[in-house]
Amino acid sequence: MALLAGRTVLLRAGVRLGAEAATRGGNGARRFASHRVLVEPDAAAGIATIKLKNPPVNSLSLEFLTELIICLEKLENDKTFRGIILTSDCPGIFSAGLDLREMCGKNPAHYAEYWRAVQEIWLKLYLSNMVLVAAINGASPAGGCLMALTCDYRVLADNPRYRIGLNETLLGIIAPFWFKDNLVNTIGHRAADRALQLGLLFPPTEALQVGMVDQVVPEDQIHSTALSVMSQWLAIPDHARQLTKSMMRKATADHLIKQREADIQNFVSFISKDSIQKSLQVYLEKLKQKKH
Ligand SMILES: CCCCCCCCCCCC/C=C/CC(=O)SCCNC(=O)CCNC(=O)[C@H](O)C(C)(C)COP(=O)(O)OP(=O)(O)OC[C@H]1O[C@@H](n2cnc3c(N)ncnc32)[C@H](O)[C@@H]1OP(=O)(O)O
């Protein structure tokens, strides 16, 4: 049933899907992988585990986003799968969020193309018909947090270094309204107001308290917990769960869909400002110097 999916992917023609491969797994399910998105299918259970693999920090570059969008489309259209577990293959990092290099020193056409891909991945994840469980096995700032927020359930590994939140203000940038909407829907208006203004990154105990994640478990139990949560969600008849999900999320998604082009223009003019470029460059430089 395709209640929510079926929108067109509007992306640059000719983006390479890297060394995409489709083979048959031991259980007969198609296993497909690209350079940076690993898919481990369990056809018998109807579950695919997506492992993000864009080292060192799973930053969401245009190419990585494009591979992820294509992967999600394939899974959405394959009736074998009813659920996705979203996790990382990079030790200690779920995702560092948007790739700052895509937002620095490029031209307006590039910024527009990049932002369209960011919107698209959010819409694909947020409106997926499948059950999405995030198994957050590492740090998850900004866009990394947003990906987790699109999921139906979030399990975070219990490690104080694995902080999660929308920290955009710390970079001198602003979380767009649809990031904010997704956060408000998850933790409520007052907590989101404070978290967004202060750019808070929550360690696991606080993330659980504020409702940013649903469960915190020891790191070695993250996958088994995600599987057990998934089986609970998959016990609900698909049509009832999907219609309910649509009812809960449609207004938030429509808010962006109705003003997608204006949102792209806002992003391009904001990110092109000299002052914003300067802030992002300083932030990137600080990240690089941290090691030395
Ligand atoms: C009314 C007006 C309306 C206007 C509306 C306009 C709205 C538009 C506003 C724009 C919104 C844009 C939204 C952006 C959301 C984002 O996602 S921005 C990205 C935010 N991400 C971060 O802040 C994370 C930064 N990274 C880290 O904190 C750490 O790297 C880590 C905790 C993830 C991992 O730490 P560690 O394991 O110690 O690795 P590092 O040594 O720090 O990093 C390794 C390597 O990766 C590079 N890197 C890290 N993060 C990124 C990134 N996000 N993008 C690109 N590159 C990254 C880092 O520089 C290191 O590189 P080198 O090895 O030194 O080359």
Image (cartoon, rainbow, N blue to C red):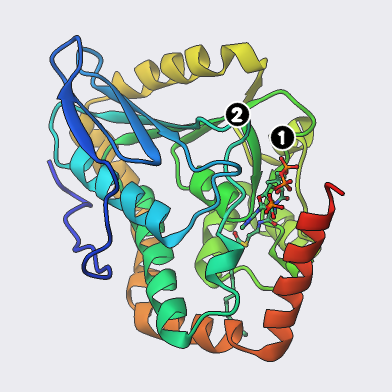
Q: Quarter for ligand 1?
A: bottom right
Q: Residue at x 37, y 71 (%)?
A: 116
- Residue 38: where, in percent of width, then height? 36, 32
Q: Residue at x 56, y 71 (%)?
A: 176
Q: Which mark is first along the chain, 2 or 1?
A: 2
Residue annotated with mark 1: 162
Numbered mark located on residue 222 in the image: none
Q: Is residue 251 left or right of residue 96?
A: left
Q: Secondary structure at mark 1?
A: loop
Given residues 241 and 222, the one toward you in this image is: 222
- Tag 2: amino acid: Asn
Numbered mark located on residue 137 in the image: 2
Q: Is residue 265 above or below residue 229?
A: below
Can residue 121 be seen here? The reply is yes
Q: Is residue 141 above or below residue 102?
A: above
Q: Is residue 173 left or right of residue 23?
A: right
Residue 232 occupies quadrant: top left
Query: Mark 1: few, some, or many residues within 10 Å (few <14, many ≥20)?
Result: many
Given residues 18 and 30, the one toward you in this image is: 18
- Residue 291: where, in percent of width, then height? 83, 47
Question: Can you tell me whether the CB of the residue at mark 2 lies under 8 Å from the nearest atom of ligand 1?
Answer: no
Residue 263 occupies quadrant: bottom left
Can residue 172 be seen here? The reply is no
Contact between labelled residues 2 and 1, with CB atoms less than 8 Å apart: yes
- Real-space Cα distance between discs 1 and 2? 7 Å
Q: Residue at x 16, y 55 (%)?
A: 6
